[in-house]
Amino acid sequence: PILERTGGPGYVTVRLGNAVLFEGQNAPTSIHGKGYHFVPRFETIQPIALEPQYGEIDELTAMTRDGFYVQVKNTRFRFRLSADPAERSKENPYPYSEEAIFDMLYNRTVSEKGLSDWVSGVTSDVRKVLAGYINRHTLDQLTAPEESGADPRGEIRTELFSGKMKEKIHKRGAELLWVDIGNFIVRDEKVEKQRLSTWQAKWMGDVRLSQSYGEAQRLAYQEIGRAEAQAEILISIMHALSDVNMQGGSHQTVRDVILIRTAQLLETMGNTPGDVKTLPEGGESRKGK
């Protein structure tokens, strides 16, 4: 801390996961990693964290394309100082490039509050992607993706890891590792009520459709049962006529046989399912066969 404020001469110990930038009166002079280093006279130091950093956006509010305000809460992400992946190893778990460190320290934004820190700059880039996505899409695409066929979280994640976004964050000396989009929340009560009504209408429609399908099946089975019963009557009458002809009966006998046989079949068909009526000249009949 003293060397940061007053400068050298002195010594600084840099531990694993850190680096330090030496600055002269007019420009940076050198960058050192892990080790014990001498700080020359009139030079100050800038400590640098090489380990992955954590960022969070507690709440973000933006307007959708169709005019509704949507909140995104608890967006979390991790990032680190950009470096060549080939240089990362067990012996050197936190590689760095001088260019990335220069971008990290000297490519920061300045506002009325002063010079922003590195984490705030990366957070600002992530915030712009979230707000821009909400501005370009409707409420249904964000909060009812199953209905519209959209995948808002997947699309936002793809945009955050796109080449354009990588280049933008790389200018800050950073590399995005992981992101959790968070939750979409709509505070308008009218929207929630309308969504509930729509949900109810959908399920009521599904119930009615199932009932109609069941009723149609019932009627179809009834018609099949009637057709089978009619066929059974005709077959039974044909057998009865065949027996009468073989015995040489008269026309009146044939007529009586048809009437008796028809009455017996109608009586059998009127029984409850499972009741079996044995006919006098062979065979059984069940209702709804």
Image (cartoon, rainbow, N blue to C red):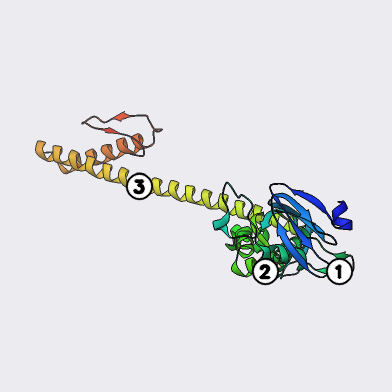
Residue 219 left/right relative to 37: left
Element type where label 1 sits in the image: strand
The residue labelled by disc 1 is 111
Q: Position of residue 196 (x, y in %)?
A: 70, 53
| Amino acid type, label 3 | Ile
Q: Earlier along the polypeptide chain: callout 1 or callout 2?
A: 1
| CA distance separating discs 3 and 2 | 72 Å
Instruction: Give whichever of 158, 205 is nearer the camera.
Output: 158
Instruction: Give whichever of 80, 191 is nearer the camera.
Output: 80
Q: Mark 2: give few (<14), some (14-19) or many (20+) Cα within 10 Å.
A: some
| Amino acid type, label 2 | Lys
Q: Earlier along the polypeptide chain: callout 1 or callout 3?
A: 1
Corner quadrant of residue 192: bottom right
Q: Mark 1: give few (<14), some (14-19) or many (20+) Cα within 10 Å.
A: few
| Rendered image: mark on residue 24 | none
| CA distance separating discs 1 and 3 | 82 Å
| Amino acid type, label 1 | Ser
The residue labelled by disc 2 is 168
Instruction: Say if 76 sits above or below 109 in the image.
Output: above
Corner quadrant of residue 118: bottom right
The quarter of the picture where the C terminus appears is top left
| Rendered image: mark on residue 224 | 3
Q: Position of residue 123 (x, y in %)?
A: 75, 60
- State if disc 2 and disc 3 touch (CB < 8 Å): no
Element type where label 2 sits in the image: helix
- State if disc 3 and disc 1 touch (CB < 8 Å): no
| CA distance separating discs 1 and 2 | 19 Å
Corner quadrant of residue 258: top left
Q: Position of residue 22 (x, y in %)?
A: 77, 60
Instruction: Give whichever of 114, 225 is nearer the camera.
Output: 114
Q: Earlier along the polypeptide chain: callout 3 or callout 2?
A: 2
